[in-house]
Image (cartoon, helix red, strand yellow):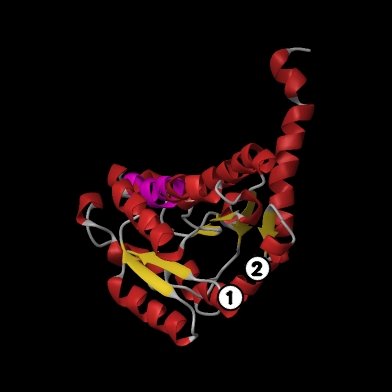
Amino acid sequence: MAKAFADRGMSVALADIDDVQLKAAGEEIAAMGAPVKTYVLDVTEKQTVIAAVDDAKHTFGKINIVCANAGVSGRMDSLDKAKLEDWDWIIDVNLKGVVYVVQACMPYLLENPREAHIVITSSISGLRVYQPSRGQGMYNTTKYGLVGLGEALSLDLEPKGVNVSILCPGVVNTNISHSGRSRPKKYGGVLDTNNDHELAKAAASGTDPRKFGEWVIKAIEEERLYVITHPDDRKLVEKRHQRILDAFDASHKIIGN
């Protein structure tokens, strides 16, 4: 996404907990000729997020597009094996971290609402739970939450002129399956991921992240709320929706009408 924005002459502010990867990304954007500033931070620390957003606004003059993209895979295992610190980590990053970023940017987005757009990275896992289970229960929980956040933001901000997109990708070629390597000590420290986990292996042949940048640009231009990038998952989403509709049809068996 950052490269797609840079291609179009936009200034780019990048933030990440991994200082090495962040430095490399910043250098790549700078090499493209785009103004760029980087911030090493943990999105679970709201005051740090606020300070970075304020500095970006001061540096570049305005904030038009915010991509709340931070996310971790969490402990990929059966939920009966989850620990409370695992829940704290994934909720604080995937859900609260996104809220912190959006809230910090909100006053600046509302300064130029007709030029403003929020992109929230949920997942296709925010629209369905894969069957059979792949140990994504914690991830599903947070990504479902982001879908609700995106829909609510869209309704609240549409009258003000700010558009919202909810990005729901399938498997992408990133290291998110190994995000536990950067888990802070306050959440239990490093969490090793089994390299043999099917999702960790699938990521190697997942979609090139660079493509998502172009797709997100299109979604912004077309003011699309939902951004679906892997239509092959449609059947699983339809099955989930059908279960909900069936429950409506059967509601009389519960309430007696």
Label 1 element class: helix
- The tag on residue 4 is 1
Looking at the image, residue 101 lies above or below residue 209: above
Q: For numbered disc 2, what is the local secondary structure?
A: helix
* Left or right relative to 9: residue 39: left
Nearest to the observer: residue 146 or residue 257: 146
Return the mark for residue 80: none
Q: What residue type is labelled 1?
A: Ala
Residue placed at 54% from the left, 47% from the top?
A: 146
Pointer 2 or 1: first along the chain:
1
> x, y percentage for residue 221?
71, 63
The one of 32 and 164 positioned closer to us in this rendering: 32
**Would residue 188 appear left or right of 79 to someone viewing this image?**
left
For the residues labelled 2 and 1, say whether their Cβ atoms are less than 8 Å apart: yes
- Asked whether the viewer can see residue 6, the reply is yes
Residue drawn where x is 72% and y is 43% of the image: 241
- Left or right of 188 on screen, residue 157: right
Q: Does the magenta stretch include residue 91?
A: yes
Q: Which of 150 and 64 is in front in this view?
A: 64
Magenta stretch: includes residue 94: yes
Residue that badge 2 annotates: 217
- Give the residue drawn at x 70%, y 67%: 218
Q: Label 2 is placed on what type of residue?
A: Ile
User: In the current view of this chain or complex, which residue is farthest to the bottom?
Assistant: 31
Q: Position of residue 151 (x, y in %)?
A: 63, 42
Q: How crowded is mark 2: few (under 14 residues within 10 Å), some or many (20 or more)?
A: some
Q: Give the range drawn in magenta.
A: 87-100
| Front position in the image: 103 or 232 | 103
Whole-angstrom CA distance, mark 2 to mark 1, is 7 Å
